[in-house]
Image (spheres, rainbow, N blue to C red):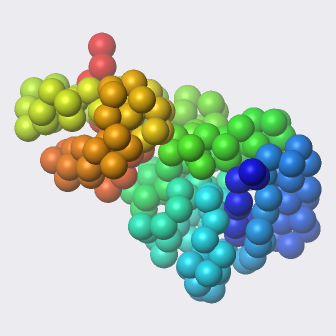
Amino acid sequence: MAVRVVLAEADAALRAGLRLLLEAGGRVEVIDDVDPGPRLPAVVRIQRPDVVLVSDVSAVRGLAGGPPVAVLASSAVDDDVQRAIDLGAVGFLLADAEPESLVRAVLDLAAGGAVFDPRVAAALLPRLRRTTLSDNDLLRGLSTRERQVLDLLADGRSNGAIAEELGLTEATVKSHVSTLLGKLGVRNRVQAALIVRQIRP
């Protein structure tokens, strides 16, 4: 079954091109393509996609609590990437990526992963290295199981994959993820993964 996507892009011609690109292999179905304006949250509620792709970082704000959202932009500005993460995006993709890379990214997002174009990740590394964090200060309040879940989450694993690895139910993993996000004081999986990446040797 194809992954169902809502594509929010301001440029109608680019929207049409992205739709063709994403649907080419039959693994992704763009169920709606719209402008990333004020009606986007209603479209997402009605259509119930597996993944939402938006061209405008500010469009992420109205989509919290719904399906995974990734920004699909023409370029990556560090502040835009950080803002997207802060607003709850779990991915930042570049529209000029290879078609297969974009399709794989959508499939990974639908499976619960966090996906960043390698060029975006490379741009974020200097910022992450500048931040000094203490393992004890950040992780002291987590149980052993929560640390295991967090470590796998930071490797980009979906809840289903984490459940299989640890011999837990997916519902239990979701509960652990929710708890550890609260303990770490972050809004989403991406922010939690970034914390782990900062403190890993």
Q: Is residue 143 above or below residue 189?
A: above
Q: Residue at x 83, y 65 (%)?
A: 15
Q: Looking at this view, is 125 or 19 the one in front?
A: 19
Q: Looking at this view, is 108 or 60 the one in front?
A: 108
Answer left or right for 139 relative to 19: left
**How many numbered discs, if any?**
0
The image shows residue 123 at horizontal and vertical percentages of 54, 34
Q: Residue at x 61, y 59 (%)?
A: 50
For the C terminus, give its image quadrant: top left
Q: Is residue 115 above or below residue 37?
A: above
Q: Residue at x 55, y 29 (%)?
A: 122
The image shows residue 146 at horizontal and vertical percentages of 21, 35
The image shows residue 65 at horizontal and vertical percentages of 42, 67
The answer, for residue 72, to whether it is visible in the render is yes
Q: Is residue 3 above or below residue 105?
A: below
The image shows residue 56 at horizontal and vertical percentages of 62, 66
> Residue 128 occupies which quadrant of the picture?
top left
Q: Looking at this view, is 127 or 59 the one in front?
A: 59
Q: Is residue 191 above or below residue 161?
A: below
Q: Looking at this rendering, what residue extends furthest in the top direction? A: 201
> Residue 11 occupies which quadrant of the picture?
bottom right
Answer left or right for 164 relative to 90: left
Q: Residue at x 26, y 27 (%)?
A: 148
The answer, for residue 55, to whether it is visible in the render is no
